[in-house]
Structure formats: structure tokens, C-alpha cells
Image (cartoon, rainbow, N blue to C red):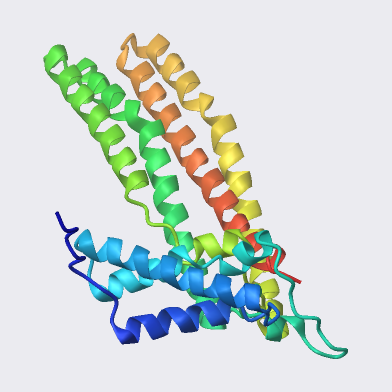
Amino acid sequence: MQTQAKQFSASEKTTLEFKRHILQQSHAFAEEPAADLYRIQLLGMMLNRYDELREKGMGEIAAENRTKYEFDDIADRMREQGFAEREMSDGFDAEEADPSRWPKMSEEEAIRYIHERDTYVHKMALGVLMCVACLTPMMLFTAVSELFWMAEEFFVMFGLVGLFVMIGMGVYTMVTAVKPKNEKRIKKKRFSLTRGLRSRLAQMREAIDEKARKRRGKGVALCVMSVIPVIIGAMMQEMFYVDAWTMLGIAGMFAMIAIGVYELVMADGEKTTMKRLLDGEKE
């Protein structure tokens, strides 16, 4: 029985694009027969992967981009195989000769990465806030039933619904948060900055560090002072003999802790963003 032929195959344009990708990624390595043979093997691997993605129903452009993304570490693969890199002559910039190891990051890419990562950190911090504050609605509904002498079981059930809604929304927000597109390349330090861009980012880092210090101070202060609403609630309960004040104090405590944790997560995330850009580039 004959083997069924593959339904999809790469076009000439796609094959040329893969060849160009391999040559660009392996530009730093010397031209030698063994290295050339390995480049041919890489091309075969990329074409096979492209066919697999196409058979799974992925579009041509999406399959091409996905394949290039998965083979973005060709330089590292060639180093693992033991291929020698070119020797740089005096006065020759190694960064310019080896774009696969130190690709230049443009100012637009850097600003987009900062914006995308800020959005990601904000969603993660918001999800943590909702999970930490999940008991707040339950305490509030219970306090309302105590204050106005209403059906306690009814409001407790409403509070339970609010608790699970808060947890669900928090988990959903964290799970659906999208990481920046260049997160993998930046975390692996596969980029470099021009002097002008580094200077501008350094100025931004000073402002962001100052903002992060304020956020951290606010977060720690809120967590430390979160016990104050409980103390006030206990005092009010002793004065008016109503348990609702203690419930309101507990609700206030969880709300303050949640906001404090949000500020701490945001402060750490903002500092990490600039640290990856300025401290993570290849020298």
C-alpha cells in the first residue's frame, strides 16, 4: 500500500524566506562544508515543521511565522554543534556582523514592549487584587443584614456568590493576560540597544523607579494599617452592640490588603520591565 502524499507543501516563496532566515541567523559562522550541510539540514527541518503545521489547519502565513519563531535559536544550535564563528578584524563591530545574536532594538519596539508589559502586569495585579479581596462582599452583605435586621441567610448567600464571582474574575483576568510579543527574546537577552535609546530608557528608568518606590511604600503602608478598620469596628461594636461593625471592619481590612498587594505587584513589575531592557542587553 502506497504512503499517502502530503496535502501541503511549502511554496517557493516560503522556501526562500526560510533560506533567508537561516542565512541571517547563521551569519556569524564561518563558511565551511560542514556548516553549509547543517544549514541544509535546518532547511529540511523547517520545511517539515511547516508541513506539519499546515496539515493541522494553520494558514500559510501563520505556519511560516510559527516555524521561523521556533527556529529563532539557529545560532545557539550551531554553537552546540561546535561550528566556529567568524574572527572579527580590528575595528569591526561584532554586533553589526552578528545580528542573530545581538539584533538591534528600535525605539518603537522598546516603547511597545514597555506598554505591552505594563498592560500584562496590570492585569496580573488586578487578578491578585480580586482574589485577595474575595471575602469583602461576603462581609459587607453580612453587615447589611445585621444593620437593617434583614434575612441573614439570604444576604449570606449573596455574599458567597460575590466571593466566588471575585475569585472567578480574578483567575480569569490572570489567565487571559497576554505577555508581550518579544518577551521570550528579551528574557533570553537576544538584543542590543543603541547609545541614544539606552540613554532615553535610562531617563525613563529613573522616573519609573521613583514611581515604583512610591507604589511600594503605599503598598506596605496599606498592609500594615489594614488592622485599623478591625480595631475601629470592634470599638463601634462595643459602643452600639451591633456585630455589623466588626464585619465592616473585616471587609475594610481585606480591601486595604488587596489594594496594598496590587501596589506591590505593580511596583515590582514596572521595575522588572526596565531592568530587562537596560540590564539584559548583550554587551
- Is 259 placed above or below 164 here? below
On screen, residue 118 versus residue 47, left or right, reads right
Q: Nearer the viewer, residue 263 or 10?
A: 10
| Residue 100 seen in the figure | no
Name the residue nearer the viewer: 151 or 42: 42
Q: Residue at x 52, y 51 (%)?
A: 266
Which quadrant does the N terminus fall into?
Answer: bottom left
Residue at horizontal 56 percent and vertical 81 percent from the top: 24
Q: Residue at x 31, y 12 (%)?
A: 242
Quadrant including the C terminus: bottom right
Q: Splitting the image into 4 quarters, where does residue 141 fall?
A: top left
Residue 18 occupies which quadrant of the picture? bottom left
- Place of residue 27 in the rendered image (x, y in percent of width and height, measured from the top left): 63, 81
Foreground pick, 193 / 191: 191
Q: Residue at x 48, y 84 (%)?
A: 20
Answer yes or no: is residue 174 visible. Answer: yes
Q: Is residue 199 above or below residue 132?
A: below
Please tell me which residue lies in front, 12 or 248.
Answer: 12
In this picture, residue 264 sits left or right of residue 243: right
| Residue 138: image location, x then y, percent | 27, 23
Q: Please state the horizontal and vertical placement of residue 118, each as a whole percent of the image.
A: 48, 61
The reply, left or right, for residue 258 in relation to residue 190 is left
Is 170 placed above or below 276 here? above
